[in-house]
């Protein structure tokens, strides 16, 4: 029986092209799921669009000296075309600057406003006096109060995933001018998440949501257990959807209030075009709503958006929110700002007509339960050793032999042997096996089951050896080739969600109409006797070492460019008086203990004997030094720096560091004859030359 599904994929920011992290985290799994549901005969609305109101867009526009509209127009076209070329089968790809979205989001806000679902508050927000602007979200950076990441944004720490307010940051800094911001009063509307806390507990924690991925359920439970607080849904910005109520002048809707409503407006746009009723996909209880996102969006889709829908009152809630972890690249975190990424437009240019290779490599190595690493060598191996050597090899042998022995006409089988019966029974079991994995959002597992079906075909041919029996038993050969052709036909159906371009090519080779998923497990003959197939062609081509070396060279060039950029000298800071300099108390100390701070990449916790005491110092040098390497090291310590807590540990000083000529971090080492008294005499000016 056909069911109705609304499938959403996270709206990408239009401040740059799509890269493999986006694909692996959201768009490939969402596309596999949507294609699979359609093959079952379901009514599917697969929805996405460009998120064009985020602060990153305004930052990009300022850097390039153009308007935000110029930026979103440029990248919306780029992203939409990339998705189409890559075969992501959206039913509608819209954008949040569209008129229908502005109308939908404004109407949604006004409904909640009229129903008194917001709290209006005057609060202090970070303000950059030089820029004459409040610092919302990514206009401010600083240290995360939870994990100590010094590059956290004003809305979220991308290191630990914690959702933040700009005022939560330690040592905040304006991303516009670099200045330290001040606090200034402003009025905003807040969604009181605390009001919906019991609903979320009942719906997620006490409800049936324990079948959600552990990373999703765990993060949501942690948020709820910590207690929810009101969340501002408006911002002091000049780019976005204007707040549509009195007193909202100069303010816009918060992007994370506006963006998920984009799923609704995109569905409206599609339904109007297709002559459908959009409300069937958002308001009927027999519709299943599924959000595909990355782990950094969990809180917005599992707490904030459901609270918005609940407050509005007429919408269904998501059945599942399968969020993936992050994909790294060659051992390092993907970074758009550092150009450490594989960009989809570049891939499509460098590997034309090989979309399915990347789809398969990303699915087979999907970051479903933990962060995974994409390497070009693995990409090459997945193609050469699996797609070419297993899948492609089986299809090529079947098609070539059928054309050689029977001029491409499917032979009439004779009696089946036990091996034939077992092989056909195994074949018919694969749709259920793959379905089980897909419906539990285990796409990596599902892709390997698909490859196992190709392995089944290869083993069957290798064991039955039709190239030998054609000389001794023609009837047996006909049966073997008939069975092998059924496996080939099953592959063209079951591969469609994972390898859509390959599936189309294989259907063309086999000269057949589209079958449904369940046809493979039924008694239907997929390729009947006397059916004419086409000539063989290679489904996949071997990827040579030179092609991989070219990609690695690109990354190496990006790495060197970043290193060069980071060596750019910073401008001189403000002048200080000599008396300010003499206030610094530096001592020669010895590191007597060192250990890694748990759950951090950069921080070491040190015990340092300064000569006047033994104190704890937290230092961000873990990526340059192992703890055991620096025990006994003599170091220069600034001992009268005000203590500061990092992840619950009070740091009582600072180790002085610098870089060598190669850019490597090194200690400012005292001369072995220098005493603490000598060190302070340097500061006091007695030895300044």
Image: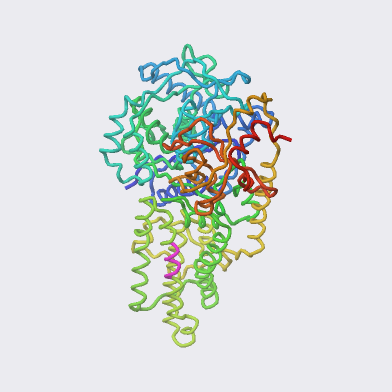
**Above-or-below relation of 673 to 172:** below
- Magenta run includes residue 671: no
Q: Report the residue at 51% width, 54% height from top.
A: 373
- Identify which residue is drawn at 64% across, 56% down: 552
Residue 394 shows in this picture? yes
Is 545 in front, or is 144? 144
> Where, quadrant-wise, is the C terminus in this rendering?
top right
Vertical comparison of 648 with 634: above or below? above
Q: Is residue 455 magenta?
A: yes
Q: Is residue 338 above or below residue 40?
A: above
Instruction: Please report the residue visible at 67 percent of the width from the left and 46 percent of the height from the top.
Output: 563
- Magenta residues, dominant SS class: helix
Which residue in the rendered view is the most extreme toward the top? 246
| Percent x, y of residue 668 | 62, 44
Question: Count of labels shown?
Answer: 0
Left or right of residue 569, residue 602 in this image: left
Chain part drawn in magenta: 450-456
Q: Do we see residue 97 in this rendering?
A: no
**In the picture provided, is 613 more to the left or to the right than 308?**
right
In this rendered view, identify the residue nearer to me: 411 or 233. 233
Q: Give coordinates of residue 215: x percent, y percent.
A: 38, 45
Across and down, in percent, residue 371 comes to 46, 50
């Amino acid at each position: 029986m056909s069911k109705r599904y609304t499938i959403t994929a996270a709206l990408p920011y239009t401040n740059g092209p799509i890269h493999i992290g986006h694909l692996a985290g959201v768009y490939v799994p969402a596309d596999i799921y949507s294609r699979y549901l359609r093959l079952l005969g379901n009514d599917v609305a697969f929805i996405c669009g460009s998120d064009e109101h985020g602060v990153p867009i305004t930052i990009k526009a300022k850097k390039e000296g153009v308007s935000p509209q110029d930026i979103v127009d440029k990248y919306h076209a780029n992203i939409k075309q990339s998705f189409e070329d890559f075969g992501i089968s959206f039913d509608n790809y819209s954008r949040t600057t569209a008129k229908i979205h502005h109308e939908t989001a404004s109407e949604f806000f006004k409904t909640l406003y009229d129903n008194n679902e917001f709290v209006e508050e005057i609060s202090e927000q970070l303000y950059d006096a030089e820029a004459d602007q409040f610092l919302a979200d990514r206009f401010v950076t600083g240290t995360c109060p939870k994990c100590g990441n010094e590059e956290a944004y004003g809305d979220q720490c991308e290191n630990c995933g914690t959702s933040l307010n700009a005022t939560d940051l330690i040592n905040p800094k304006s991303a516009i001018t670099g200045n330290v911001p001040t606090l200034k009063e402003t009025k905003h509307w807040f969604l009181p998440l605390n009001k919906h806390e019991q609903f979320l507990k009942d719906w997620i924690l006490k409800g049936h949501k324990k079948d959600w991925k552990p990373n999703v359920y765990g993060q949501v439970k942690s948020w709820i257990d910590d207690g929810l607080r009101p969340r501002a849904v408006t911002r002091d910005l000049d780019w976005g959807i204007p707040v549509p109520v009195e007193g909202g002048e100069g303010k816009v809707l918060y992007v994370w209030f506006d963006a998920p409503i984009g799923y609704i407006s995109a569905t409206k746009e599609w339904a109007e075009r297709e002559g459908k009723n959009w409300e069937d996909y958002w308001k009927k209880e027999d519709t299943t709503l599924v959000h595909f996102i990355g782990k950094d969006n969990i809180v917005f889709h599992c707490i904030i958006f459901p609270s918005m829908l609940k407050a509005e009152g007429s919408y269904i809630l998501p059945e599942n929110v399968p969020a993936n972890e992050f994909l790294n690249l060659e051992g390092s975190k993907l970074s758009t700002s550092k150009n450490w990424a594989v960009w989809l437009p570049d891939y499509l240019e460098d590997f034309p007509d090989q979309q399915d290779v990347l789809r398969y490599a990303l699915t087979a190595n999907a970051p479903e339960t933990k962060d995974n690493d994409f390497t070009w060598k693995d990409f090459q191996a997945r193609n050469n050793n699996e797609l070419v050597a297993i899948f492609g090899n089986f299809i090529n042998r079947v098609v070539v032999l059928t054309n050689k022995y029977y001029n491409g006409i499917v032979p009439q089988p004779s009696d089946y042997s036990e091996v034939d019966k077992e092989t056909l029974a195994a074949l018919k079991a694969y749709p259920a096996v793959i379905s089980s994995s897909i419906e539990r959002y285990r796409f990596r597992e599902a892709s390997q089951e698909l490859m196992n079906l190709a392995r089944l075909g290869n083993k069957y041919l290798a064991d039955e050896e039709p190239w030998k029996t054609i000389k001794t038993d023609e009837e047996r050969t006909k049966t073997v080739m008939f069975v092998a052709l059924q496996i080939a036909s099953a592959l063209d159906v079951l591969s469609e969600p994972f390898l859509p371009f390959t599936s189309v090519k294989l259907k063309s080779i086999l000269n057949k109409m589209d079958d449904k998923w369940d046809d493979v497990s039924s008694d239907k003959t997929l390729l009947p006797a006397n059916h004419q197939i086409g000539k063989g062609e290679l489904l996949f081509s071997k990827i040579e070492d030179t092609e991989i070396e070219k990609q690695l060279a690109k990354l190496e060039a990006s790495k060197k460019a970043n290193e060069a950029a980071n060596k750019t000298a910073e401008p001189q800071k403000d002048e200080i008086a000599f008396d300010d300099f003499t206030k610094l108390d530096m001592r020669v100390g010895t590191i007597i203990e060192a250990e890694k701070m748990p759950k951090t990449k950069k921080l070491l916790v040190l015990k340092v004997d300064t000569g006047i005491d033994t104190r704890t110092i937290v230092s961000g040098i873990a990526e340059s030094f192992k703890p055991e390497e620096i025990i006994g090291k003599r170091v220069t310590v600034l001992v009268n720096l005000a203590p500061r807590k990092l992840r619950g540990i009070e740091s009582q000083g600072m180790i002085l560091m610098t870089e060598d000529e190669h850019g490597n971090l090194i200690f400012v080492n005292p001369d072995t004859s220098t005493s603490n008294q000598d060190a302070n005499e340097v500061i006091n000016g007695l030895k300044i030359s």
